[in-house]
Image (spheres, rainbow, N blue to C red):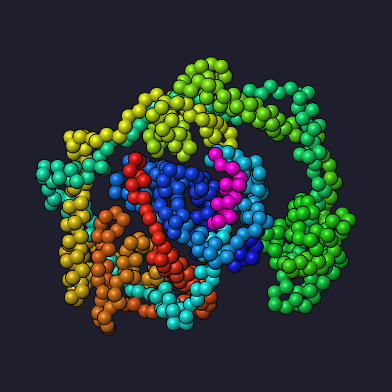
Amino acid sequence: MLQKIRERISGPFAIFFLGAIAVVFIFWGVQFESAVNSAAATVNGKDISQEAVRRAWQERQTELQTQRRDELPPELVKSEQARLLDDFIARELLVQRAHESGYRVSDRELAESITRIPALQVDGKFSRDRYAALLRQQGRTEPEFEQEYRRDLETSQLTNAIALSSFVTPGELRRRVELQGEMRDAAYAVVPAAGFAAQVQVTPAEITAYYDKNKSQFMSQEKVALQYLQLNLADIAAGVQVTEDALKKYYDETAAERNAVPERRKAAHILIETGSDDAAASKKADAILARAKAGEDFAKLAQENSDDPGSKAAGGDLGWAPKEAYVQPFSEALFAMKKGEIRGPVKTQFGYHIIRLEDIEEPHVRSFDEVRTELEPEFRRDQAQALFYEKSQQLADESFASLSELDSVAKKLGMTVQTVDGFTRQGGGALGNDRKVIEAAFSNEVLQERQNSPPLQIGEESVVVLRVTDHQPSMQLPLAQVQEQIVTRLREDKARAAATGAATALAKRVNTGEPLATAAASVGSTAVASPSLSRRGPTVEGAAPMVPELLQAIFKAPRPAGAGKVSAGVATLASGDPAVFVVSSATPGTPAVFGGDLAEQARNLATQNASIEFDAYLAELRRTAKIKRNDKMFAAE
């Protein structure tokens, strides 16, 4: 679906927009048209629902907490909430402009596009069952999803049109080549902050001031204690009773489908690649075919003449394979041959083949005894699937009926109540960090009202129902408890500041003509030469890789002012240590650096220009639109 559009969309720019669609609709499950009492924002008279933005924020909040493994600082929460609302406003602006401009997606295009969403596929093919299951989990209907997905596909047409309108001038391309292919000779010296640690002191007043200023960093984690019942497909499968009669019946029902073995043939070949001279390759293949038919050793001929690196060393042996394993001209020839026959040359896109048929395995159905060992786990799983679904329904019904406890549910279903203590917004214990479990544990119904959660599907083979038995809110940790932590931070900060000051002084000395090696030695450091640097790192074979922060700083520094001049500066490494660097030469890049082919550079530059132009386009939409934001909508969070 959307074939013409898909053919035109390519590169990181398009991937960004289409990727955003998948994230929004498959993983967030946002329902933008839900009815709410008030709007999160109004764009040209069109409301954006608070419910949609709040649901998206819950998802984003969980992601951030999982990444940071700690409580979120208020300033980060505020900035992320503002960014999220901006994203919704931008989407609405694009939807409105797409409709105004006449972009439309037909029902057929919509259907075909949905079937290509990876999250809705099983083994590479669209699964209607998976599609329906995901929508059920999100409490959505197909019309709701398809309406919103259609809108984003229409928006993608607009963004693609902007991307296709971007172009690159010769001057831009020349400048990019000069910058991207630039080579620099440099040297650097790291000034370890640890060398200044003994010189720094931390006073009680500084400790108190740091604590008062950064109280949000010293909070205990919010925790809950959980009870849960977990139903696993594997456990049910292990309890399935298996008899020989049942297995044989299962075999009889599925033998033709699961155990049919198509005809296979064992072949060897000699490949002569056509290269730039097809006639010469054909003549060579004819000569080798004649030698093979005259009785020369086929394996030896293959070892000496074949251009197939995968089979050459094995004398051209291709092993056993069905007809579908080969390209059509090869397979048609091979499966029309008699055992021991040599045929060729057979031309394919790979070249000319001389083929020898070694053996034939007729199509057949594997017997019960042959498949007995692999049949049993299949049978168990097949039987367990129905039981798993049935018991999942019972678990859902019973946990809803006994809304505030699980003991009676466990007794009725023959299950065991399990527990997890200290479960945080990053997860914990046997329940791990599954997003759905975390969201359920800290939802209002489970956390505040102490109700059982609805059944939560974990993967494809497990279902969990949980309830909160205890809640420990996040609390301010007293100064005495975090004092040592603060002292360590302050010592590290002061040591780094001292090291940075020393490094800055060294850079000034180097810029006035002092050799880096001499300046570095004065603080106990050693200069490291790094000639022939590209923007990707050292180009000299065997040279040690350079950390990204230092490499970026070296290429951001001004070029030396002239012959005999240098350009020195300071870069802060990921470790926090500063490094003094000096650039002694800078040579602009030439087309030769890119192998003389500038097509890739032109494409990259066009993609960058498209992104910049899209940002400008969106900024103009914002400027001319009537936008009213509800900045208080997150106040209750």
Q: Residue at x 63, y 23 (%)?
A: 239
In the image, 135 versus 575, the foreground residue is: 135
Q: Is 435 rendered above or below residue 102?
A: above
- Segment tinted magenta in the rendering: 139-152
User: Quick check: is 144 in the magenta stretch?
Assistant: yes
Q: Position of residue 238 (x, y in %)?
A: 62, 25
State the image coordinates of residue 361 (x, y, percent, origin top left).
83, 47
x, y percent for residue 618: 43, 65
Q: Is residue 119 visible?
A: no
Give the residue displayed 79% in from the left and 61% down from the top: 328
Q: Residue at x 40, y 49 (%)?
A: 40
* Quadrant placement of the N terminus: bottom right
The quadrant in which residue 208 appears is top left
* Magenta stretch prevailing secondary structure: helix
> Residue 414 at x, y = what percent?
56, 18
What residue is at 40 percent from the left and 60 percent from the top? 626
Q: Write down the quadrant of residue 616 in the picture.
A: bottom left
Pick out the residue farthest to the front. Answer: 45
Q: Is residue 394 visible?
A: yes
